[in-house]
Amino acid sequence: MTPFILRRALLSALFIISCLLSNTTFAKTFTFTAIPDQDQTRLKQRFEKVANYLEEQLHIKVNYIPVKSYSAAITAFRNNQVQLAWFGGLSGVQARRLVPGSEAIAQGKEDQFFKSVFIANTKTKLTKSESLPPSPEKFTFSFGSKGSTSGRLMPEFYIREHYNQASDLTFKRIGFSGDHSRTLALVQTGAYDLGALNYKVWEQALSDGKVDLNKVNVIWVTPDYPDYQWTIRGDTHKYWGPDFMHKVQKALIAIKQPELLKAFPRTKFVSASSSDYLGIEQTAKSIGLLD
């Protein structure tokens, strides 16, 4: 074999090995993210534990990466930067519409019967009622993220249903805090009169002693609706085998560790499917958040 032919053979072999190593490295790292619905410290504590748990169950490298916004979580999922995500109802619908074949595979038991709570600063003199308050035009109102199901979509839906007009025509001023924890803080300090947030974040804040009931209280609770879920890309079989989606679903549903469940907080995870969120999709279309 001549030196030229030998050199070409070696370069070809190195190229093939490089490709194989690249694919192997990718296949060994299963990456997921989550919508940033609370403060980053709590999210990091929660999902790094989930990553460790999934590594043990799936026997592959698992990595959690944080994102700064709901739209960033959807973009990472669309671009295959992450293969699994903890989405809210609306963000999950948006992500699955962008990635054909992706599926909702698991949700918290409580996510089947989720709720939003409407809260008010006590200076408004509003108390808990069976309906939304009269004379809303004198109050300011804060949603959470613009892409949040429990902090924007469903509150907006019920505002329109009750007042027969959009929120920006109903209240003196509306705003978007970015996440549920900030909505609570803004209403508690009086920066906004009213707000809506995820009932689980409200309950956790109460449990953690972060709610001053002399300054803020719940004035109305929405009816139930489906919300958070784990959604996985449909092409994961290309990297981790034909049954990988089911393996991930099984691992998530099998979570029993109290410290993992409490971090969400959920009592357990149950199976889910994309069809569970058809109502969320139709609601989003009805108020112009989806085409």
Image (cartoon, helix red, strand yellow):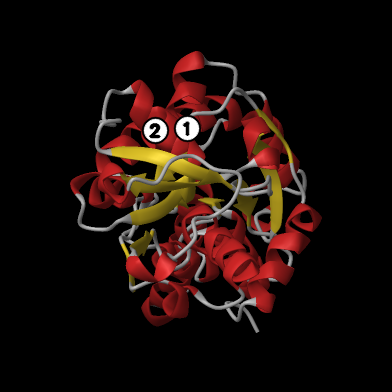
Residue type pointed to by label 2: Arg
Residue 256: give x, y in percent of width and height.
Answer: 59, 17
Which disc is residue 133 wearing?
Answer: none
- The reply to whether residue 34 is visible in this rendering is yes
Q: Residue at the location (44% across, 61% down)?
A: 73
Residue 54: give x, y in percent of width and height.
Answer: 53, 32
Which one is closest to the eye, mark 1 or mark 2? Answer: 1
4 vs 47, nearest the viewer: 47
Mark 2, secondary structure of its residue: helix
Quarter of the picture holding the C terminus: bottom right
192 vs 236, nearest the viewer: 192
How many residues crowd around disc 1 within 10 Å: few (fewer than 14), some, or many (20 or more)? some
Furthest residue in direction right, as rendered = 275
Q: Residue at the location (69% across, 62% down)?
A: 280
> Dot 2 corresponds to which residue?
46
Horizontally, is 282 left or right of 49 in the view? right
- Whether label 1 touches label 2, CB < 8 Å: yes
- The reply to whether residue 14 is visible in this rendering is no
Horizontally, is 3 left or right of 274 in the view? left
Q: Quadrant of residue 181?
A: top left
Which disc is residue 264 wearing?
Answer: 1
Mark 1, secondary structure of its residue: loop
Residue 210: give x, y in percent of width and height.
Answer: 26, 30
Residue type pointed to by label 1: Phe
Q: Give the mark nearer the N terminus: 1 vs 2.
A: 2
93 vs 84, nearest the viewer: 93
Q: Residue at the location (33% across, 45% down)?
A: 125
